[in-house]
Image: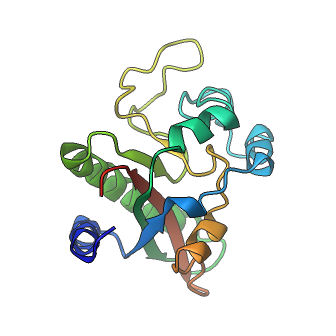
Amino acid sequence: MGTEEWKDLECLALDTGFSRAAVLDCATLELRQEVREMCAANTCGMYGKNLACPPFCGTLDECREQVKGYGSGIIVQTVGEIEDSMDFEGMMEAEAEHKAHFYKMAELLRRKYPDVLPLGSGCCTVCPACAGPEGSCRFPEKRISSLEAFGIVVSDLCSRNGLDYYYGPGKIAYTSCYLLKQI
């Protein structure tokens, strides 16, 4: 990715409201079975319920096939303030802020890069209630799978691309990325 293209993407990310942004080298993406197995443990309650989550988002091999051909992109973060590790309300506020920025930037990027692959934080929330598992996705062109659904360890992805993952006590970071083919 050229310097000018990167600066444009970084400005877009920061103008959209993200706290941090970093160049993403898609060669650093590692899709791991252990992460998918954590999804299957259903800690978040979305396994088999949200159409952008496993098993509906495809096998790990199918996810690898989707990622193939992407060379670069951008990692974005929203770093929020929390009172302590039990501040669930603060965590939810930071997550909602991150998702709002994430969906907005995804729409902006789709105009310039129609084949962008956005990978978010947490399950897809494009619809107030997912049609799955018995229904079909109402907006497949807007559906967002998470980094974890693709088997990606977020802390590893950040460190491999020069972005912090942990910002200390009193902070929480939500991380997502956009994969781009044509830069």
Q: Where residue 134 appears, x then y in whole percent?
A: 58, 12
Q: Is residue 20 left or right of residue 157?
A: left
Q: Where residue 88 appears, x then y in whole percent?
A: 58, 64
x 66%, y 56%: residue: 30
x 81%, y 41%: residue: 41
Q: Where residue 144 appears, x then y in whole percent?
A: 45, 40
The answer, for residue 77, to whether it is visible in the render is no
- Quadrant that contains the N terminus: bottom left
For residue 83, above or below residue 130 = below
In this rendered view, identify the residue nearer to me: 60 or 108. Answer: 60
Q: Is residue 150 left or right of residue 106?
A: right
The answer, for residue 115, to whether it is visible in the render is yes
- Quadrant that contains the C terminus: bottom left
x 19%, y 48%: residue: 112
Q: How is the image coloured?
A: rainbow
In this rendered view, identify the residue nearer to me: 88 or 153. Answer: 153
x 47%, y 45%: residue: 69
For residue 90, above or below residue 30 = below
In this rendered view, identify the residue nearer to me: 87 or 57. Answer: 57
In this rendered view, identify the residue nearer to me: 104 or 163. Answer: 163
